[in-house]
Image (cartoon, rainbow, N blue to C red):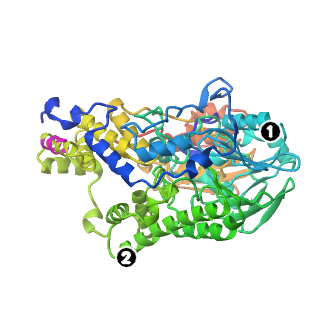
């Protein structure tokens, strides 16, 4: 998802015979062309949209001051990391290959530059997926959320200084623990100034643990899935990527992290930063496990971070994460609507554009509150009647609340009713629907072979899918074809037809990230999988605890390959003044941080980077032993046997094929 400079240690740190083509409805569709069913779906969507009104068009451009002359932001080597004009093509009537609601949304979301919100608050928008908020202090700038990358943050600050006058950054605030809200830190401030106590860095309690741990254990899977969610490698365009629903996309520069010097644990806590009083609302456990909102008292402005934006959000992100608490989300929005919005002349967000006016802001927060509460309560109500997650999602999607027809910001440009209803079901009951047939099903490829055989073979499945496509039932056609692809991965006709089915579903999607996933799948079916690996940020690696690292290394252990069991490895990490031990057992590796054991089979005294090289990079033992400051004593043959039992860090894996 992000390309960084640093150590490459991946997740640890970040259908018989073919039918003639002329007989296949799918084969008659041209790539990049909307089918009649898709055009009809778009017409139905357009008829059901809320009244256009003027609020979004007005608020999205209100206060515009300036933007960069050169739209391309580059890294030190001259490589582009962001293009402000990537979505300049979004203008006029929606093309037939884009959902009209999503197209309308992007006409507002594509705006970029420096915008004034109040006399003392500005935002840089469109320089990344997130917004950078600037508050004028007595002597400098207070920055909230320094974007994803150092390069994007530097470009944003340069625009601020050029337009408003150069001032030092006198405070940095992270609203929550996701990388697009802290990754550009070193592009805004000098770490030395923070270490010297000159610049406070404020974050919600638990920030460091959550910022470093979310992508550790499941990092490889999350990064692979994130490539689908954000449409990595798919160019923006009328038949391509259409942003992410809450922003255009993610900048691809250098991720950094400067640890906070102060944390906030309770709602109502205040901090004085460069003469500006800030009050915080803790909303952890909703959109992020560590998150707060910020009320800027002198300016009467409220930052709703990411619990309220221009779209329904995700209770569970498609890339994967821990399920979020929709009930708590609604409760915090209610607190914001009743406590902070009535005294706020503007409500700003870490994504999208502001809402101006106290009554307008209160109503905006209340509408989003009601949406999450409806999602939660109706899912639970139906769940307790015995409905499954698929049945609930289908019912709620078909009967959205009345407010859905009036308020644009509750629509699913990012999260969706369907996905969120399933997430809430999972939050309470897990994946199992209590039907025993689903308790121990065959794995996908084995099940697919049986289903294809039961349906009469590959030719029969192709014919059924062709009929479904001709009727515009792409959901059924993709279900049929995905099973055929898993049963017969070399069936070119199946993959071609499935790609077209996915493509039309992408064109129909109102959610930008649903569109991305369908189009990414279609691309891989046509062109194959592209392996993408990214080096993890040195700052992120440094911030990870040693316990998190050794626990992550233990997930690489393949006990069936282990030649040595009951083997103890001691690490004396001289640069950290830490000791760790790995005990290699019959089934698992147990890691502990603490004192060295009285007796170990091998002891490694070295900087922590040597441990990373051995366990994650799988650098040759002989090479690591020659690194400066490394000594290895004991059974090196046994150590090598253990290292050989560790999987290499996974770079990628197949999703649309088995």
Residue in front for this viewpoint, 271 or 239? 239
Task: Report the span colored magenta.
Answer: 460-466
Q: In the image, is 286 to the left or to the right of 561?
A: right
User: The C terminus is located in which quarter?
Assistant: top left
Tell me what residue is drawn at x 67 percent, y 59 percent. Answer: 357
Tell me what residue is drawn at x 62 percent, y 57 percent. Answer: 592
* Residue 298 percent across, percent down from the top left: 81, 59
Q: Which badge, 2 or 1, is on the more N-terminal residue?
A: 1
- Can residue 220 be spotted in the picture? no
The residue beneath circle 1 is: 164
* Few, some or many residues within 10 Å of mark 1 (<14, 14–19, 20+): few
Residue in front for this viewpoint, 565 or 590? 590
* Residue 79 percent across, percent down from the top left: 61, 25
- Quadrant of the image occupied by residue 345: bottom right
Spatial separation of the CA atoms under disc 2 and disc 1: 56 Å
The residue beneath circle 2 is: 384
- Magenta-drawn stretch contains 196: no
* Residue 376, placed above or below residue 649: below
Secondary-structure class at tag 1: helix
In this rendering, which labeled residue sits more in front, label 2 or label 1?
1
Tell me what residue is drawn at x 69 percent, y 39 percent. Answer: 631
* Residue 141 percent across, percent down from the top left: 81, 46
Q: In the image, is 120 to the left or to the right of 4?
A: right
Q: In the image, is 472 to the left or to the right of 325?
A: left
Residue in front for this viewpoint, 477 or 446? 477
* Residue 458, placed above or below residue 20: below
Secondary-structure class at tag 2: loop
Tell me what residue is drawn at x 55 percent, y 36 percent. Answer: 534
């Amino acid at each position: 998802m992000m390309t960084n400079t640093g150590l490459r240690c991946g997740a640890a740190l970040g259908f018989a015979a073919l039918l003639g083509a002329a007989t296949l409805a799918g084969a008659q569709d041209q790539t990049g062309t909307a089918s009649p069913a898709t055009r009809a779906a778009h017409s139905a969507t357009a008829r059901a949209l809320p009244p256009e009104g003027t609020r979004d068009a007005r608020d999205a451009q209100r206060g515009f001051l300036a933007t960069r002359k050169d739209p391309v932001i580059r890294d030190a080597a001259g490589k582009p990391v962001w293009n402000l004009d990537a979505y300049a093509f979004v203008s006029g009537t929606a093309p037939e290959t884009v959902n009209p609601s999503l197209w309308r949304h992007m006409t507002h979301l594509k705006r970029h530059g420096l915008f004034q919100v109040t006399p003392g608050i500005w935002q840089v928008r469109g320089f990344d997926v997130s917004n950078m908020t600037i508050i004028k202090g007595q002597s400098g700038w207070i920055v909230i959320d320094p974007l994803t990358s150092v390069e994007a943050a530097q470009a944003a600050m340069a625009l601020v200084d050029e337009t408003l006058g150069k001032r030092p950054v006198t405070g940095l605030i992270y609203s929550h623990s996701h990388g697009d809200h802290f990754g550009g830190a070193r592009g805004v401030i000098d770490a030395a100034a923070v270490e010297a106590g000159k610049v406070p860095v404020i974050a919600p309690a638990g920030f460091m643990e959550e910022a470093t741990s979310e992508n550790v254990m499941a990092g490889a899977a999350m990064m692979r899935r994130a490539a689908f969610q954000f449409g990595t490698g798919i160019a923006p365009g009328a038949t391509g990527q259409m942003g992410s629903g809450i922003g255009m996309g993610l900048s691809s520069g250098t991720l950094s992290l400067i640890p906070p010097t102060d944390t906030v644990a309770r709602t109502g806590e205040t901090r004085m930063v460069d003469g500006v009083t800030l009050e915080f609302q803790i909303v952890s456990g909703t959109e992020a496990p560590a998150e707060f909102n910020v009320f800027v008292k002198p300016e009467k402005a409220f930052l709703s971070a990411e619990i309220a934006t221009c779209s329904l959000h995700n209770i569970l992100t498609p890339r994967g994460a821990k399920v979020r608490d929709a009930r708590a989300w609604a409760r915090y929005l209610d607190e914001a609507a009743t406590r902070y919005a009535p005294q706020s002349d503007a409500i700003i967000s870490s994504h999208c554009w502001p809402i101006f006016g106290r009554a307008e802001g209160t109503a905006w927060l209340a509408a989003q509150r009601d949406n999450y509460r409806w999602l939660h309560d109706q899912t639970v109500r139906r769940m307790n009647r015995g409905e499954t997650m698929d049945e609930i999602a289908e019912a709620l999607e078909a009967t959205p609340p009345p407010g859905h027809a009036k308020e644009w910001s509750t629509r699913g440009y990012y999260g969706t009713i369907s996905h969120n209803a399933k997430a809430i079901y999972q939050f309470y009951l897990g994946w199992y629907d209590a039907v025993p047939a689903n308790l121990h099903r065959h794995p996908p490829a084995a099940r697919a072979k049986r289903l294809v055989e039961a349906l009469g073979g590959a030719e029969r499945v192709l014919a059924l899918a062709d009929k479904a496509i001709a009727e515009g039932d792409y959901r059924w056609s993709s279900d049929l074809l995905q099973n055929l692809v898993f049963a017969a991965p070399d069936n070119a006709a199946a993959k071609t037809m499935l790609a077209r089915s996915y493509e039309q579903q992408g064109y129909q999607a109102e959610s930008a990230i649903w569109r991305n996933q369908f189009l990414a799948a279609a691309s891989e079916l046509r062109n194959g999988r592209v392996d993408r690996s990214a080096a993890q940020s040195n700052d992120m690696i440094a911030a990870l605890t040693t316990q998190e690292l050794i626990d992550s290394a233990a997930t690489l252990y393949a006990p069936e390959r282990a030649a040595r069991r009951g083997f103890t490895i001691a690490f004396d990490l001289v640069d950290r003044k830490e000791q760790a031990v790995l005990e290699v057992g019959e089934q698992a590796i147990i890691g502990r941080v603490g004192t060295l054991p009285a007796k170990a089979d091998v002891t490694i005294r070295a900087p922590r980077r040597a441990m990373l090289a051995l366990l994650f990079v799988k650098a040759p033992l002989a090479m690591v032993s020659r690194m400066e400051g490394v000594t290895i004593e004991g059974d090196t043959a046994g150590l090598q046997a253990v290292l050989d039992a560790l999987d290499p860090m996974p770079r990628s894996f197949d999703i649309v094929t088995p």
